[in-house]
Image (spheres, helix red, strand yellow):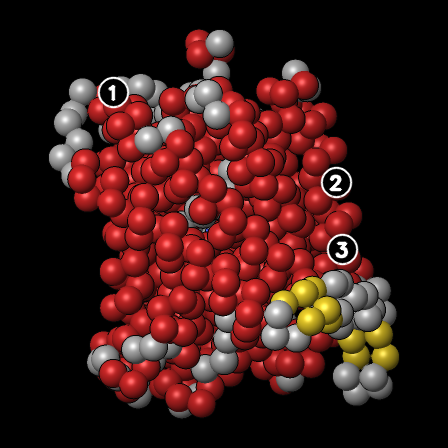
Amino acid sequence: MENNRAQWGSRMGFILAAAGSAVGLGNIWKFPGKAFEGGGGAFLLMYLLIVPLIGMPAMLSELAIGRASQSNVVDAFGKLGRKGYSWVGWMGWSVAFIITCYYSHVGGWVLRYVVSYATESRSVYADPLGYFYNMLGYHAATETTFFPVTVILFAFLFLAICAFVIIKGVEGGIERFNKIGMPALFIILLILFARAATLPGAQGGLRYMLSIDASKVSPQTFLIALSQAFYSLSLGMSIMVTYGSYLPRSENITKNTVLVCSMDTLVAVIAGFIVIPAVFATLGPDGVGKGGGFAFVSLAGVFEQMPGGAFFGFLFYLLLLFAALTSTVSLIEGIVAFLIERWSWKRTPTTVITCLLLFAIGCLYTCSQAAFPLKGIWFDFANGVTFPPFCDAMEFLTDRVMIPLCALGCCVFAGWAWKPENVITEVERCGVKFKLVKTYSFLIRFVAPVAILVILAVSLFTGTTLS
Ligand code: PHE
């Protein structure tokens, strides 16, 4: 069994693929907006504490579960003798599926913007919000809606690229693709950083990111930082278990965990230091918004006022595109790996059918943004049953409920069911002693589960305010 399993061709291949999964849209457009809301330095400090204290133990456990079980995420828990935990695997698999439906469509929007900046940056500048809505099928001037065929085609193209990489397999596709994509991403990131930091007026933004405003250090900020860390590190899904299962026994899981978490955090922090100072320099502190509209709408004002703006805008969306591609590839691999193993299906048709399904469901996500009033259902104790737009319901369900639940399942499994001793035995298979046994056990058994439970409770009691 073990011998037939795909493996990473090299250590660097794994690290880049895992970092490629972690570094995604979350780092580049979610993180800066949240850092701004959370008071800049205050948020940054909390985030930098959360990653080593909660993110790293959780990632270490997921990788160890994957490698010990040599299995896809659904079967992993059963293989380690705890069939009762297979719901965690199913949940992880389902989260990956639902997230990919919309993640890949947002990838399509990004691809659209790469082309927009290359060919018609003036139209974007003329009316950034109008351009964005128009892409999504709403014509503001006439208040008419239409089927957003162009962006849907871009989403199709985006998924086709991902499918191509997955079909090529673990070493020949995913590893090779990340070996090009990740260094490219770092280079673009550094160029943009140099540009943003030298804009006149950028100091205000740099100062904001480096000073700690005590009034912003609140439980709410902490929770936003915590859920951002889980999302950003790709935890609570099938990804790290699946990627861990392709890791040779000789590999040092601890070292890899530290490297991947550090790379992910570094990219998020640099992205914060690009976007916030750039927005301060061109639009002032009021120009910082959050979420999807922020990356697509507010930033147009930044590029318009920046010398060489269209080129840097193009580079920025290219950066987002690489980030989104490597993350989507990891998500689809998690989905497909299970289908192939469980039912002995062939890689190519499984990938094609999965991608078509993801694409079709994702169309509902894109269309419910502005073109058609498709509704989803949501329940929380603060507001009862509500019918938010389909796209929002989809994101709440995964980010607020399913990811935390699955992450909780993994921590409880590692800390209480399978036990830290077994995690550590797996980690030490590479021959290097794990020195932080007590600290790890404490963090995985108590700190991480309690923190996750709080996120879950807050999501259910405050409704949609925790983003
Ligand atoms: N971690 C990715 C990001 O920061 C998102 C992602 C989530 C990727 C889940 C894979 C799985 O955007």
Q: Which residue is mark 2?
A: 356
* Residue count near mark 2 (Cα–Cα under 10 Å), binned few <14, some 14–19, many ≥20: some
Task: Provide residue 395's location: percent of width, then percent of height.
Answer: 61, 60
Q: Which residue is mark 1?
A: 429
Which numbered mark, 3 or 1, is in the foreground of this view? 1
The residue located at (26%, 23%) in the rendering is: 425
Task: Provide residue 204's location: percent of width, then percent of height.
Answer: 28, 86
Marks 3,2: beta carbons within 8 A: no
Q: Nearer the viewer, residue 191 or 61?
A: 61
Task: Provide residue 291's location: percent of width, then percent of height.
Answer: 53, 71
Q: Is residue 381 above or below residue 265?
A: below
Q: CA distance from mark 3 to mark 1?
A: 45 Å
Element on which disc 1 rests: helix
Q: Is residue 401 above or below residue 369?
A: above
Q: Nearer the viewer, residue 425 or 137?
A: 425
* Residue count near mark 1 (Cα–Cα under 10 Å), binned few <14, some 14–19, many ≥20: some
> Of marks 3 and 1, which one's residue comes earlier in the chain?
3
| Badge 1 amino acid | Arg
> Of marks 3 and 2, which one's residue comes earlier in the chain?
2
Q: Which mark is residue 439?
A: none
The residue located at (26%, 28%) in the rendering is: 421
Q: Which residue is mark 3?
A: 363
| Badge 2 amino acid | Leu
| Badge 3 amino acid | Cys
Residue 220 visible in rendering: yes
Residue 272 visible in rendering: no
Q: CA distance from mark 3 to mark 2?
A: 11 Å
Q: CA distance from mark 1 to mark 2?
A: 40 Å
